[in-house]
Amino acid sequence: MSNLTRSSVWQALSAHQIEIREQTMRNLFANDANRFDKFSLREDGLLFDFSKNLITEETLALLINLARQSNLSDWIERQFNGEKINTSEARAVLHTALRSPRDCSVLVDGKNVIPDVHRVLEHIRRYSDAIRSGATLGHTGKKIRHIVNIGIGGSALGPLMACEALKPFGSDDLTAHFVSNVDATDIAETLKKLDAETTLFIISSKTFTTQETLANAHTARAWLVDHLGTEQAVAKHFAAVSTNLSETSKFGINPENVFEFWDWVGGRYSLWSAIGLPIALYIGMENFERLLAGGHAMDEHFRNAPLEKNMPVILALLGIWYGNFFGTGSYAILPYDQYMQHFPAYLQQLEMESNGKRVDREGKPVDYDTHFVVWGAPGTNGQHSFYQLIHQGTRMVPADFLAPLTSHNPIGEHHAMLLSNCFAQTEALMLGKTESEARAELVAQGLTGNALEALLPYKIFPGNRPSNTLLFEKLDPYTLGRLIALYEQKIFVQSVIWNINAFDQWGVEFGKQLANKLLPELRSKGTVNTHDSSTNNLINIYRNRHIA
Ligand code: G6Q
């Protein structure tokens, strides 16, 4: 048994779960008029309502003890102070430094990194201002109208999510495009919409060795040269964001258009760095700075609030409560804001890549579950598809509902309708529909006898399905920054309790190793027989189709 599962707090939580699972939230609400006040937090315009969870004050106290037992407060300081807590890569983890004000000091190997952070922010400011104002033009003297981010994973999902979420703040003169997949369809369909004279490509790659990104970058370069008739055009139409400056120069990017970041920024935590360049170009530097300020404000809350009143801590502990003590395998992110349509996919990477680990910090396999599957879609669309399983399936799926109080598009009754759906769903998931309520409904519809009894079981909803609600005033850069940092720090808390490293990603590296391995065999002349019979046949079928 691991220290964690052997610990008295873990054992107490297991015993407590047996009592709690017999209770209903319906009763917990009925018996406590102050339940909402007890189990909600408000901070700087953000409301976190976690009262619709299968918890009591005792549950929360036990969960807080679990956090204390893992020395969470020390770990928080170790993260912020730039200790090399990403031990398997021997790196500090300092996305928090990227959103820190100029007068802060954070040392990595004895050097304060904040001046470098602000030097690169200044570079982003100069460049994005010049492109947006037209002071810097394309090779033929035309204003840039399209930005194409070429990058994948952590070098794509954050900027894609944020540009969509902050569309109301985006420039009317610019369109942001994102190309990730090595499938040529991705870049081909994007290029079809573009005019080379007004297009800027940003090659975003921490390593600048990623197969998909380099293949797309070379295709984009060839397309541009073909359309503008000269290699010289590349200097005005390509920028790069990378930690690998020698590779960006080999690719031929003008050094003035190369934006640097550092190995202590993890890919999936990098939208705050120069990887956010497309965001700054699209929404302008002032708005990008508001995003950073929001992230920093959540960091300050996380660092200073007591554990009982700490949003990332509570959110993390609730995840652990269900994942480890109720055995839930997945967790839904349900934003009731169309601009947040890419938020579930963004969190899917952030959470699953960070905490999808099976070995602890000492290199031993864990004897408890770590992260669950994260998925979701914007409301109300999901209500017409997968919510069925959340309401009446056999598995418990905890969910976070996120919603703005006001809409960027206040048209008629749309927003009231949207939020009434959101609130009604969390209520229905919690309450369910009892047999007698279902029966009364059927009677009211005129059903009786066998017909009523036959339909009754299908009309019952078990309820007791947990959810959190995060309400905010309006989706703006500052709020988005806070929400992203909330989830980043939640993930960190869970990793501390699970005693795993949230900041490496050997599974992704494995994929990168495999990516180039099989390619020569697809091109080879002779029949391939070095693999298992399935892989051999798949390769040979492809070869027979393509190799003469
Ligand atoms: C993120 C991951 C991964 C990475 C991509 C792209 O944390 O490591 O998603 O961002 O594989 O890598 P490059 O930025 O090096 O091209």
Image (cartoon, helix red, strand yellow):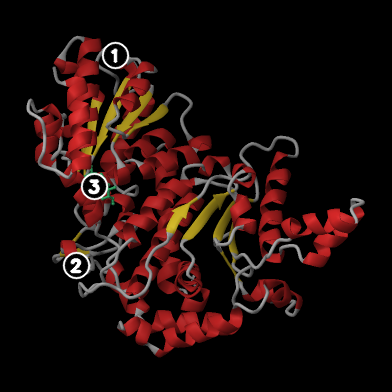
Q: Which image quadrant is residue 493 in? A: bottom left
Please, is residue 83 above or below residue 353 in the view?
below
For the point 47% across and 47% down, which residue is it? 343
The answer to the question of whether label 3 and label 2 lie on touching residues, with beta carbons closer than 8 A, is: no
- Three-letter amino acid code at disc 2? Thr
On the image, the x and y values in percent for residue 339 come to 53, 40
Q: Which residue is mark 2?
A: 87
Eye-nearest disc, 3 or 2 = 2
Nearer the observer, 291 or 429: 429
Amino acid carrying label 3: it is: Arg
Q: Position of residue 408 (x, y in %)?
A: 61, 39
- Residue that mark 1 sits on: 141
Measure the C-alpha gap from mark 1 to mark 3. 28 Å
Task: Give the number of the disc on residue 119.
Answer: 3
Q: Is residue 90 above or below residue 57?
A: above
Mark 2–mark 1 Cα distance, whole angstroms, equals 49 Å
Q: Amino acid at mark 1?
A: Gly
**Residue drawn where x is 51% and y is 42% of the image:** 341
Residue 56 visible here: no
Kindly check if marks 2 and 1 are in contact, taking CB atoms under 8 A apart as contact.
Answer: no
